[in-house]
Image (tube, helix red, strand yellow):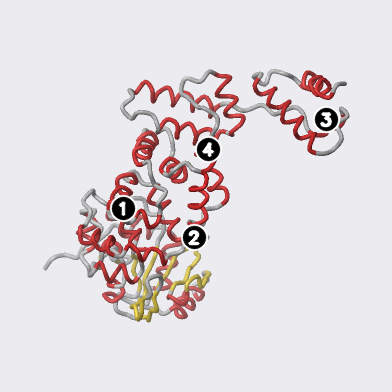
Amino acid sequence: MAQPLRLDTRDWMDDPATQAIVRALDTGPGTVRFVGGCVRNALLGEPIEDLDLATVHEPQRVTALIEAAGLKAIPTGIDHGTITAIANGQPFEITTLRADVETHGRHATVEFTQDWIQDAHRRDFTMNAIYADPDGTLFDPVNGVDDARARQIRFIGDPDQRIQEDYLRILRFFRFNARYGGGHVDQDGLDACARHKSGLKQLSGERIQGELLKLLNTSAAADILCLMENAGVLAEVLPEAAHFDRLRRLIAIENSGVIDADPVRRLAVLVRSEASAIEDMAARLRLSNHMRDRLVAVAQNQTPINADMDERQWQLAVYRLGFGLFEDCALACQSSKDATQDATGDAAWRRLLEKARQWSPPRFPLSGQDVMAAGVPQGPDVGRLLDGIEQWWAEGGFAADRKVLLDRVKAEIGH
């Protein structure tokens, strides 16, 4: 008889918080198991971010067991069977086994069950329906282990049915292929995503935004977005996408090991640069004002940035933009260059960014109070004069001291 597959859970179970949660819920064999991302990532040797558990206990019973153990229980999604338990300040998401009664394309009506197989068959991908007992014994009702090891993203059962239960699964299919896929995309799943792409219109901008930004944060983002484009899916959620080669180039630059990946920056180089297009996209995807302003600033940047800028030029650019936006704009400019340029060109960009990162811009020595003390009445003229003096000071290499600047103010107002 074949031995059951077993996962090494010592890294999890050695943690006192995890032990406390398991002790509280483990009332007998098969009453609580780890599930989802922690099991999948452990199999793949990927970092484990969150520990999620599934249990036969209904939510009220979960709450009672957790509180009886002296821990905190928060009803974060109690209607759908989810309780968040807090142990030693660490959150654990605990969900009662469920079966779908009715699905609506965005959410489902569920009933609780004690059948682990029923619970598995309502999940999205086979690699997400692998369970692990606290001792590491795996329960694999949908052959998720083989798919995970092959890095094959496969819908559980009928892809059309899984997608129609929740259209967000279309975006998750592409995002999981970008993050965990081995390069071979399941054709049945891809075809189903293309057939049901119009269902994406039912999703909120926030849900679409979340999946797109996670996808953009992967090394395979450009290739998978092209796959989405060819399937007609990308036009449903990001019609502004236009510059796939620039995105691919930026990812290569970031992957060189000196720049952290940034999904908002990647979005900035991917989409069309018209401010109106960015504003429409930001509104539709419910981007924060900070994200929107950052995208517009990169797209509409009027400060030329080149790898061979002299010190005065790049310092002035950093002063005007701030280092964060300077880095965004510099990388956007670099990604627009010919990808065949030699390594010397890339090295010049790296030197520029390193110098800019280490430089601390000086503080402008004057304020509005200084301008008014010189005789300018309070009002818009104060700001206009101060801005002009500051620009003169910055363009002069920040050399003028406070006395010289005050003399400049007096000269400007005719004193």
Q: From the image, tell me which residue sits under label 3.
A: 370
Checking the image for residue 113, the label placed there is none
* Residue at screen point 40% across, 32% down: 336
Q: Depth-wise, is mark 3 or mark 1 nearer the camera?
A: 1
Residue at the image position 49 percent from the left and 34 percent from the top? 329
Q: Type of residue at label 2?
A: Gln
Q: Give the tally of numbered discs.
A: 4
- Asked which quadrant contains residue 176, the reply is bottom left
Residues at marks 3 and 4 touching, judged by CB atoms closer than 8 Å = no
Which marked residue is nearer to the observer: mark 2 or mark 1?
A: 1
Query: Which callout, 2 or 1, points at the residue further toward the start of the chain?
Result: 2
Q: CA distance from mark 3 to mark 4?
A: 33 Å
Give neighbour class at mark 4: few <14, some 14-19, many 20+ (Cα, 10 Å): few
Say whether disc 3 or disc 4 marks the residue closer to the N-terminus.
4
Q: Which mark is residue 228?
A: 1
Spatial CA span between label 2 and label 1: 37 Å
Question: Which label belongs to residue 90?
Answer: 2
Residue type at mark 4? Gln
Secondary structure beneath label 2: strand
Quadrant for the N terminus, please.
bottom left
Q: Amino acid at mark 1?
A: Met
Left or right? Give the position of 63 relative to 371.
Answer: left
As measured in the structure, the alpha-carbon distance from the residue carrying label 4 to the one carrying label 1 is: 27 Å
Number of the label disc, if any, that sits on residue 300: 4
User: Residue 338's quadrant in the figure?
Assistant: top left
> Who comes first in sequence, dot 2 or dot 3?
2
> Mark 3 touching mark 1, by CB under 8 A?
no
Residue situated furthest left in the rendering: 1
Q: CA distance from mark 3 to mark 1?
A: 57 Å
